[in-house]
Amino acid sequence: MTDVVATNQTILVVGGGISGMTAALEAAECGKDVILLEKNPSLGGRVSQLYKYFPKLCFPTCGMEINLRRIKARNNLRVMTLAEVTKVSGDKGNYSVDVKISPRYVNENCTACGACSDAVSAEFDNEHNYNLDKRKGAYLPFTMAFPQRYVIDPAMIGTDDAAKAKDACPVGAIDLDMAEENIQLNVGSVVWATGWKPYDAAKIQPYGYDRFDNVITSVELERMMDPQGPTGGKLIRPSDGKEAKDVAFIQCAGSRDRNHLRHCSRICCMASLKQSTYTREKFGDEGKSTIYYIDIRAIDRFEDFYQKVKSDSTVNFIKSKVASVVEDKDTGNPILKGVDTEGYKRYANPHDLVVLAVGMEPSVNFNDAPVDIVSNEFGFIEANPENGGLFGAGCASDALDVNRAVQSATASALRAIQVVNQVAEAED
């Protein structure tokens, strides 16, 4: 059994993305005992899948590296991956949390040498790259994965490939007999930083995501641009590998729509503005970006970034809710159809590639979650007194960009600290 010591003075953080790491670190650096749970094999969340942040266009690896250094420096912060909460009971200041820990099949002897991966041939969809390519059955989730340990895909267990992986390991790190564990934690407060997921673009039938190869999502484009992504950093069309020099961005793909997500996902406008710079980055003046928008929501400091992109001669803005996307059978070009509301002109515009700025929804449906917590009409956790010592952080609490998610996580950590401080005072 996993040996974990936790008391009503312990703060539990559920979710190891940027918000979860921030909440856990802020609480731990204030001297509190913290346990950070992540259901995936590594910390990082959606931020680890980004190519660049807006508006500075810097790489997220910098922030990740800093946070991982801080985590490694904290003896009072325990990280548990492949861990999922199955039940929460109790009250503010005294919660009992049941946790299921799935086997990694790789122990702490692992040096991340990669010998196990080299030895196996089985391949599976690569979740980190939104299934745009394949990964080996023995794999490191991504370069900066923490913990820096390989994982054996459960589907490999009992196969010859699993035995090959074990035989190839020079330090005896492969343990094919690892089994699922169930533990119970006693904690004083819980921060839910379970993050967000992209809206399913296949549900937006008029845009043809599930029918046309050259219609992709904004999150998939982020992975394509990464040099370690599925295309090696090349901006190309999935259908034929041709360079995508003429890219269309469709805003509010699934957001602000009574048939899909009724809320504004906030990040979509800025994501498309950022991604329009990728076309120039790859092709210079030969690249062309067209942003089809209802309105541009670039508030506060983002207004300057919007104006900078707007002044770029390679970027064109068309005020329109695209009605449909069809495909030119001869060229494979997606053709966008609709009405430009500035002048009310009908258009049928061909492009090399279409990127859907998909909306943001909570990763967890809290109506079905193993915890009694109040969420709003959009599924995000509310700041409600009825939640007691349970707090939402980051995109579990609202649709937020990275900067605001970090701020939210810091605030939630402070609220959690207040709860355990009150418990300590009551016991003195």
Image (cartoon, rainbow, N blue to C red):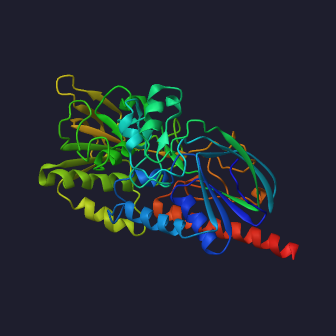
Which one is nearer the viewer's eye here, 276 or 90?
Answer: 90
Closer to the camera in the image, 260 or 355: 355
Relative image position of residue 96 (x, y in whole percent): 79, 52
Q: Identify which residue is drawn at 37% across, 30% down.
A: 121
Residue 285, quarter of the rendered image: bottom left
The quadrant in which residue 129 appears is top left
In depth, the one of 196 and 304 nearer the eye is 196
- What percent of the width, then of the height, locates residue 205? 42, 28
* Visible residue check, residue 203: no
Corner quadrant of residue 102: top right
Residue 267 in the image: above or below residue 178 = below
Residue in the picture at 68% in, 71% down: 32
Q: Position of residue 156 (x, y in %)?
A: 49, 30
Indicate left or right for 26 with 369 as reference.
Answer: left
Q: Is residue 179 visible?
A: yes
In the picture, the quarter occupied by the C terminus is bottom right
Q: Can you name the residue that lies furthest to the left here? A: 286
Question: Relative to residue 69, is residue 339 drawn left or right?
Answer: left
Up/down of 379 relative to 122, above or below: below
Residue 20 percent across, percent down from the top left: 57, 59
Residue 90 is left or right of residue 206, and the answer is: right
At 60% from the left and 36% from the top, the residue drawn is 177
Q: Residue at x 53, y 48 (%)?
A: 196
